[in-house]
Image (spheres, rainbow, N blue to C red):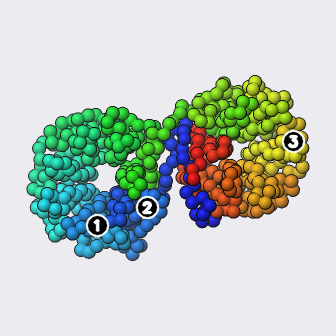
């Protein structure tokens, strides 16, 4: 794969317009080689913000705008770290403080190396369980000094003066059992440390004296997450997540509001559009956003396990939400604005197989969506919808074959547009032609053949005729769309293909682009000879393929795989990649600059941006 930036289209991208998916598929994925235990935002002096991860091999720093690794702990210093927080010292230097198997250390964010001496060190290979520090929090005192709190398996909170590295008072035994949550709540009235332990109590502490401030809060269950939340009226609340998520007033020790019913495991304050205050929450159902102005959920639920989150302000004013830390190396970066993208009711089906753009007599273009439950033949239908809104247009087409797989539009000599539907029927594959004006089958089957049908498209065949091109394991075959007769020999493609599209080359020749297991190959549709093989090289199979003509440049190729959508120049240069949550099953171009994408559980429409 040629991963050059594509100078002709340096800012090309895909903007999501609408979706029937349970969540918008637009996000970036960080795939770390280590198991991630925690994460935090790391502000840099130049105004950028990096994502700092702690895990099984030390610390890693990632650029949230590119999802690229910036720095990592060298293997010679690799050790497991758990909690991780950034701290700005009184000398203006920002360091990372991490708790790990060998104690509590400062880390240089520029090199990802530990800074000696450690704040708290363990000697030898065997560390007593009670001595392990699991939780960290820091506040800046009114005089500018920085105070750190550590808590571990022994239920003890220890305060530290980070300017001297000395303990700021004796250890205080505050919880029965492990302290698994520490945070700081700061407001105009001052700062407090907050701790949560296995005894289900939540305690607030004076960061200067270490004395408990007021009675213990009793949320009624083990606390899974703590966090400071700024409310729309300017008050700073304490969020406590457990069997539900409640917002507490840290001064009066009273509940302000029950925000999220049901078990919650992680939370993070993030801004919403219009400057509204929002809160990202991981629940039993998944990740969701809540508007703190209305105390209502915003958008759908993301089915994604996340035990840790971090808000990452970007230079362009946006804030991304990092979510992960479930023991794997996968961290997803979400734009909270995506949760507010219109989400339409999904078609009455369990899966989506194919999409096709269908021109009509009145000049409109409709989007045909093939859906179906493979165990119920009555559920296999084709829905027609308005691509501008996703709204249905007319009743669905039903009475289709047993295993509906592929679609394509076929212009008729009398001005109609027929819809070719590829299905399996018993041991054979077949193509049916449907008249969209009447919603009925248009004459006999176009063709019936013994092959594994994986792709169906149409292309000019000369003399005003239209050819259907079917492709599968055995190769590709052209057929007369009206008579069903084969045109020429079967094209013996080298690899089984998943998708084929016609493509006009820069020199005017007609080609047939085929998505295969290792990329995209280009063939002569008349002879079956390879023109360029491979045209594009990929590491994942290309499940779907679309060609997008450009008024001021060459036709672009768009590929869909199990993990991403990619836009390519015909030279094979990669222009941009969009990670997706679900495997792409089909693609089609709608109009001049839109792309419909069929995923396993829904359809999304994107607009090409430059």
Q: Which class describes the residues within 10 Å of circle 1: few (<14), some (14-19), or many (20+)?
A: many
Q: Which class describes the residues within 10 Å of circle 2: few (<14), some (14-19), or many (20+)?
A: some
State the image quarter where residue 351 is shown.
Answer: top right
Residue 122 in sight in this render:
no
In the image, which disc is placed on residue 95? 1
* Residue occupying the far front of the picture: 552
Q: Residue at x 24, y 39 (%)?
A: 233
Residue 180 location, x and y as percent?
Answer: 27, 51
User: Which residue bears the numbered disc 2?
Assistant: 63
Which circle, 3 or 1, is nearer the viewer?
3
User: Which residue bears the numbered disc 3?
Assistant: 464
Residue 134 location, x and y as percent?
Answer: 27, 57
Q: Which class describes the residues within 10 Å of circle 3: few (<14), some (14-19), or many (20+)?
A: few
Q: Residue at x 81, y 43 (%)?
A: 468
Q: Secondary structure at mark 2?
A: strand
Q: Secondary structure at mark 3?
A: loop
């Amino acid at each position: 794969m040629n991963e050059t930036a594509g100078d002709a289209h340096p800012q090309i991208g895909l903007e999501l317009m609408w979706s029937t998916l349970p969540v918008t598929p637009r996000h970036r994925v960080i795939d770390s080689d280590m198991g991630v235990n925690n994460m935090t935002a790391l502000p840099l002096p130049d105004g950028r913000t990096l994502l700092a991860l702690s895990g099984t091999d030390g610390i890693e720093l990632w650029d949230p705008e590119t999802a690229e690794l910036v720095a990592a702990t060298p293997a010679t210093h690799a050790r497991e770290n758990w909690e991780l927080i950034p701290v700005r010292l009184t000398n203006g230097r920002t360091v990372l403080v991490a708790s790990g198997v060998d104690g509590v250390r400062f880390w240089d964010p520029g090199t990802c190396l530990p800074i000696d001496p450690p704040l708290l060190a363990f000697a030898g290979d065997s560390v007593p369980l009670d001595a392990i520090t699991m939780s960290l929090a820091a506040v800046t005192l009114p005089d500018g000094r920085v105070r750190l709190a550590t808590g571990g398996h022994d239920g003890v909170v220890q305060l530290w003066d980070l300017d001297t590295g000395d303990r700021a008072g004796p250890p205080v035994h505050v919880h029965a059992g492990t302290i698994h949550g520490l945070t700081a709540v700061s407001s105009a009235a001052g700062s407090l440390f907050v701790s949560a332990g296995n005894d289900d109590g939540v305690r607030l502490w004076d960061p200067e004296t270490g004395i408990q401030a007021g009675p213990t809060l009793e949320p009624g269950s083990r606390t899974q997450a703590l966090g400071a939340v700024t409310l729309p009226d300017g008050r700073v609340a304490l969020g406590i997540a457990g069997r539900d998520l409640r917002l507490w007033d840290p001064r009066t020790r009273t509940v302000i509001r029950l925000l999220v019913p049901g078990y919650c495991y992680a939370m993070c304050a993030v801004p919403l559009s219009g400057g509204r205050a929002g809160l990202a929450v991981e629940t039993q159902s998944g990740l969701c956003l809540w508007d703190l102005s209305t105390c209502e959920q915003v958008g759908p639920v993301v089915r994604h396990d996340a035990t840790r989150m971090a808000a990452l302000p970007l230079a362009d004013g946006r804030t991304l939400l990092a979510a992960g830390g479930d023991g794997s190396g996968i961290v997803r970066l979400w734009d909270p604005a995506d949760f507010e993208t219109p989400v339409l009711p999904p078609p009455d089906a369990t899966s989506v197989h194919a999409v096709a753009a269908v021109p009509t007599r009145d000049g409109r273009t409709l989007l045909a969506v093939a859906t179906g439950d493979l165990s119920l033949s009555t559920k296999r239908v084709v829905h027609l919808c308005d691509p501008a809104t996703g709204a249905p247009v007319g009743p669905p087409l039903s009475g289709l074959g047993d295993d509906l797989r592929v679609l394509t539009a076929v212009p008729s000599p009398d001005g109609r547009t027929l819809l070719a539907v590829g299905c399996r029927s018993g041991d054979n594959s077949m193509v049916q032609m449907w008249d969209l004006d009447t919603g009925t089958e248009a004459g006999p089957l176009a063709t019936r053949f013994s092959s594994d049908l994986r792709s169906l498209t149409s292309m000019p065949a000369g003399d005003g005729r239209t050819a259907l091109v079917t492709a599968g394991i055995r190769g590709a075959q052209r057929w007369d769309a009206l008579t069903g007769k084969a045109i020429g020999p079967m094209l013996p493609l080298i690899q089984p293909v998943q998708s084929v599209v016609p493509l006009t080359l820069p020199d005017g020749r007609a080609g047939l682009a085929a998505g295969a297991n290792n990329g995209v190959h280009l063939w002569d549709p008349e002879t079956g000879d390879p023109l360029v093989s491979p045209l594009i090289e990929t590491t994942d199979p290309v499940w779907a393929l679309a060609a997008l003509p450009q008024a001021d440049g060459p036709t672009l190729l768009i590929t869909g795989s199990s993990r991403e959508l990619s836009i390519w120049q015909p030279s094979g240069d990669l222009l941009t990649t969009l990670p997706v949550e679900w495997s792409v099953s089909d693609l089609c171009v709608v109009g001049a600059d839109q792309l419909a994408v069929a995923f396993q559980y829904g359809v999304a429409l994107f607009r090409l941006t430059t």
